[in-house]
Each structure stands twice: as C-alpha cells, then as structure tokens.
Image (spheres, rainbow, N blue to C red):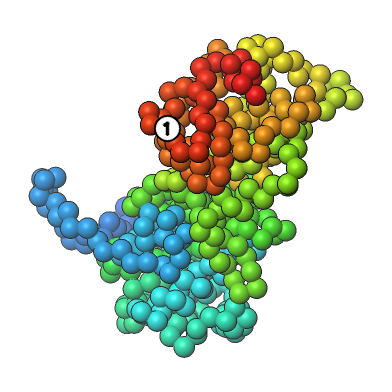
Amino acid sequence: MAKKKTAYVCNECGADHSKWQGQCAGCGQWNTLQEFVVSSAKAAARDTRFSGYAGDAGASDVIKLADVDLAELPRFSSGMQEFDRVLGGGLVPGSAILIGGHPGAGKSTLLLQTLCYLATQMPAIYVTGEESLQQVALRANRLGLPTDQLQMLSETNVERLTNVLQQHKPRIVVIDSIQVMHVDGIESAPGSVSQVRESAAYLTRFAKQTGTVLFLVGHVTKDGSLAGPKVLEHMIDCSIMLEGSGDSRYRVLRGIKNRFGAINELGVFAMLERGLKEVKNPSSIFLSRGDEPAAGSVVMVIWEGTRPLLVEIQALVDDSHFGHPKRVAVGLDQNRLNLLLAALHRHGGIHLGDQDVYINVVGGVKVNETGADLALLLAALSSFRNQPLEQGLIVFGEVGLSGEIRPVPSGQERIKEAAKHGFTRAIVPKANVPKQPVEGMEVIGVDKLQEAIERL
C-alpha cells in the first residue's frame, strides 16, 4: 500500500509547508498550520471532482473573446431590496455566495426568511448540518414564516447531498454551514482546511453546472475573519458579511467580493421579533440626534457602494491625566486618526498632543473611505473648543499631509442627499462644489484645512 503524502496548509494565507512548524513562513501567524492529505497525480487525474469547475464541463475548445455569448443571465429578487442591493441587483443563476458573520448576527435567520419567500415561486432546499430539522422549524414558526413550500434536508456528506439535489433540481440551495460538510476519501475532520476546500469546490462546481444559486454559511474566527483556508474566498462568486453586535437591533450586510456587482455595498436591517426587516432609508436611523446641538458632533456624508449615507461622527477631547495621551477610534482607522491630528497641529495650529482624543461613528458603521477626514477634524476641534456646530451642517473631504482638502468621488450626489434630509450648509472640497446651486443648500468650498477651520 502506497504511503500517504501529507502537507501542512496555513489557515490564514493558504501557504503550503512540508512539515509542521509553529509559525507560518508566509504570513507570520502562529499555530495556523493544519495537516492536509495530498492526492497522487494519478488519483487526481481519475477524480472527476476537478473537471468542469467553471461550469463548462468538457468544453476545452479555444474560442475568440468576441465569440463568447454575452446573453445576460436573468436575475431574480430575493424579496428584500437591501439584500438585492448588496448582491448587485439580485440573485444570478449558478452563483456561489458565501455569507459570514459572528454567532447570533442573524445569518440563518436572513437565509431562512429568503428561502421561505422564494420557495413559493421556485424549488428551494435548505440544508442544515448544525441544527436539527425541528430547531429550524421552531425558528420559522416563531418568525411567522410560510413553511408549506420550503424543502428541508439534514445532511453533511457532500456526495450524498449532491445526489439528492440532482433528483429534486432546486433553483436555490442554502448550506448551513460549510464547516460541517465533508467529502469521502479525505481523512481529516470536518472544518479542517482540506475538508472545507474540497467541499466548497465540489458544491461550487455543482452549482455552476446546474445553474443553481448556492448559499454557503461560513463561520468566523475570533478576530472577525472567515474561518477556513483563504482559497475559499477565491472559489466563490460573492462574499458578504453580516455585521452587528448582540446588543444592537441593527445589522449591516456588507459586500466584500462580488463578481456580478459593486463591492462595499451596504444593506441595513433591523432585528425584530419577526426576524430581520430591511431599513430602506438608513440615513434616518444614523441621524437620531438630540434637539440641542452638542459640542463634538457633526454629520458627514460617506459613499457606500452605489449610494450616499449620512452618518454622525462624535469626538471627545479631554485633558490627559497620564503621560501618554490616548487615541481611540471606533468605526475608523486609528492610524489615520493619528495622521490627521498631526496635520491639524501642523497646518491648523491646533495642538492636541496633551489631550485624550476619542472618536466614534454613531450606529456601528465602519467607515473605510478618506471622505470622513475633514468631518473628523472639525468634530475634534468642536469638542476641544466646547463650541457646538450648527445642526444643519454637513461636512466631507479628504485631508492631505500638506494641509490641502482633496475632492472625493460623487461629491454632487452627496450634497443632494444631504439637502433631501433638510441640511442647509455644507463645507466640502472646492473641486466638489456643484456648478449649479442646490436648492436650499449653501455650499462652501475650501482648499486648505485652515480655511475650513475659519469657516466654522
């Protein structure tokens, strides 16, 4: 009997190692290597799981790019506009979608609601490997969902699962979760690098060849990243994350990767007794401010995917009672906060080196763009001076290290969105000032950081 060949694969970066070691040589992480049984070349050649992975089984002819059929696959709605927005406009037949999130975020609830709605229009199967069928049925009854059309299956073996799917021919399938699935012939336990990689590849190939929409529920690690090999995120077509803490009623669905639409799209849901309900106007929930203006608070307009979003940013600047002042940023990059405070000192003449600075984006939104730079500094300055800013003011713009205010994309759309919500004054980069005046909005364009401070 031939001796088995083994390799050790890193959970974080997917790097291969010939023997186990404590630290991965590829990414430098500790205790991330797991054993993986390597198939021989002959066995891999006989294995039909690796044929036709992209959905064109047996098609090996070379054709010109101009001859490729550009007929667009018809999308269909999931029943929720916010969900469709994150997916790029709806569900694409043959697509593999990976949804992740912390335990209790609402992944299973969201998918169960979606499938109960779609099951009334097309064949749909919900595959559960972690919960029993009774547990899923209890949740559906508690949420008041229609349960007479949705088909359920409790299975963890991928080969048996695909055989059942071929018989029933569903148009949409949910696998909850990919970490409990296993493939015959691989000796490692479910959830290991080899099992997750092979199970995802097997199911993705099946989805593409049959035109089935495939949802894979993925676990996350303690630092919030998807568990399993990094190659898992390369296999699928769309990767989305459901964010939200257990003490908050709102959940944010964010698109990380999407081959059929824009990334960084944002969908907002409210967790109610009857499950997740979409919030069609997210700016309204992030702008629940008090009647009295408060120092350190300003509204900024950020761009998420294909739409503007009005979010309040709060700053608290206080005397430091220790030798090393604190810099805390919630919802923003802390390194960017240090960089902007240095620019404020150098080009604005405001010294905060002996002050503790705390920054928070209201509503748990994570801001990844530089358009929040100017709003962050003006909020910190307002708190430092203890001077509230006017309620009708909105701010956005990127701050450079030389003190210049740089323009941001989609500036006019941001200003129009703020005007719809009743804001009357805007401090924006001069290059983002619209050529035609916006009704009810005074737009002030600035070039330098010092100019923006003087305009307060």
- Which amino acid is tagged 1? Pro
- The reply to whether residue 21 is in sight is no
Marks counted in the figure total 1
Q: In this view, does 314 lie above or below 137?
A: above
- The reply to whether residue 129 is in sight is yes
In x, y percent, where is residue 118? 40, 75
Q: Is residue 434 left or right of residue 268?
A: left
Residue at 81% across / 19% down in the picture? 354
Q: In which quarter of the image is the C terminus?
A: top right
Q: Classify 10 Å Cα crowding around label 1: few (below 14), some (14-19), many (20 and above).
A: few
Quarter where residue 237 is shown: bottom left
Which is more toward the observer, 158 or 356? 356
Which is more toward the observer, 48 or 162? 162
Q: Determine which residue is flagged by label 1.
A: 437
In x, y percent, where is residue 108? 55, 68
In x, y percent, where is residue 379? 68, 30
Q: Is residue 438 left or right of residue 241?
A: left
Residue at 61% across / 38% down in the picture? 392
Q: Is residue 249 above or below residue 422?
A: below
Residue that protrudes farthest toward the right in the picture: 321
Residue at 52% across / 31% down in the picture? 442
Which is more toward the observer, 317 or 440? 440
Q: Is residue 342 above or below residue 48?
A: above
Name the element at disc 1. Answer: loop
Residue that protrudes farthest toward the front in the picture: 440
Residue that protrudes farthest toward the bottom in the picture: 148
Quarter where residue 106 is shown: bottom right
Q: In which quarter of the image is the N terminus?
A: bottom left
In x, y percent, where is residue 389? 69, 32
Q: In this view, does 322 lie to the left or right of 359?
A: right
Residue at 26% across / 64% down in the picture? 74
